[in-house]
Structure formats: structure tokens, C-alpha cells
Image (spheres, rainbow, N blue to C red):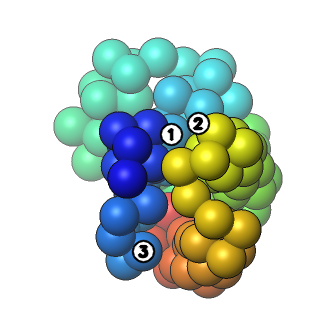
Amino acid sequence: MEASARRLGLADSSSLNFNMQAAFIFLGIDKAVFAEQVQAGKSFAEITKDHGISRQKLVDTLMSDFTAKIDDVKAKGDITQKQTDQKKQARTPLLPLHPQF
């Protein structure tokens, strides 16, 4: 499996390797601001709410970013269509249940 597939967490379907930069851009903050807010005791859901964005909208954004990246890895021939479908299916129910969200 190529490095791009491993970076997306495609080697382990139980992991949640979403692009946090996509979330930061969506929220209009950078990693440092996010870290400060987490250190202040806020959850990702609280940070999202503070920026006037619903939790579901954040989940949708992260899933969309993840789906695009998985499709890119497939397009490069690093994984099969079956693997692509499995990875998407494995992630879909997990994100909304993840404690950070």
C-alpha cells in the first residue's frame, strides 16, 4: 500500500484519520487557536458551536474531505473499488459517535 493510502488510515479501518486542516479551514481557525481552545477544556463540538456551525455540518465537511481523498487514492490505483467502498462504509457510522465530536 502506498504512503498516501497509509496517511489516510486506509491500512486500518478502525482508525479515524480525518484531515483536521479541513475542519480548521471550515471553522475559520488555525491549529494554534484550536489547541488553545482544547487546552481551555472545550470539546470539538463546543468549538464548532462557538463558531456558529452545527456539529452535523462539521461531520459532513470531514466526511466529504475524506471521501474526496479516498477517491483520489483509488484513482491513483493504490486501492481497489471494493477497498474504497469498504473504507467509506467503515468511516460513515464512526465519525458521529467519535468522542471528539
Q: Relative to 3, does residue 43 appear above or below in the rendering?
A: below
Which quadrant holds residue 68? top right
- The answer, for residue 57, to whether it is visible in the render is yes
Please report contact status of discs 2 and 1: CB closer than 8 Å, yes or no.
yes
Q: Which residue type does callout 2 highlight?
A: Ala
Question: Dot 1: few (<14), some (14–19), or many (≥20) neighbours within 10 Å?
Answer: some
Find numbered disc 2 in the image and state the secondary structure of the residue it sits on: helix
Q: Position of residue 96 (x, y in %)?
A: 59, 74
Please tell me whether mark 1 sits on a helix, a strand or a loop.
loop
Closer to the camera in the image, 94 or 43: 94
Task: Residue type at mark 1: give it.
Answer: Asn
| Amino acid type at image mark 3 | Ser
In this view, which residue lies farthest toward the front?
A: 77
Query: Is 21 placed above or below 1 here?
Result: above
The residue under the point 63% across, 65% down is 80
Q: Count the marks.
A: 3
Q: Which mark is residue 13?
A: 3
Any mark on residue 23, and which?
2
Name the residue tied to disc 1. 19
**Front-most of residues 1 and 50:** 1
Q: Nearer the viewer, mark 1 or mark 3?
A: 3
Q: Position of residue 73 (x, y in %)?
A: 60, 44
Judging depth in this view, the residue of 3 and 23 nearest the camera is: 3
Q: Nearer the viewer, mark 2 or mark 3?
A: 3
Above or below, 19 against 34 in this view is below
Give the structural element (helix, strand or loop) at label 3: loop
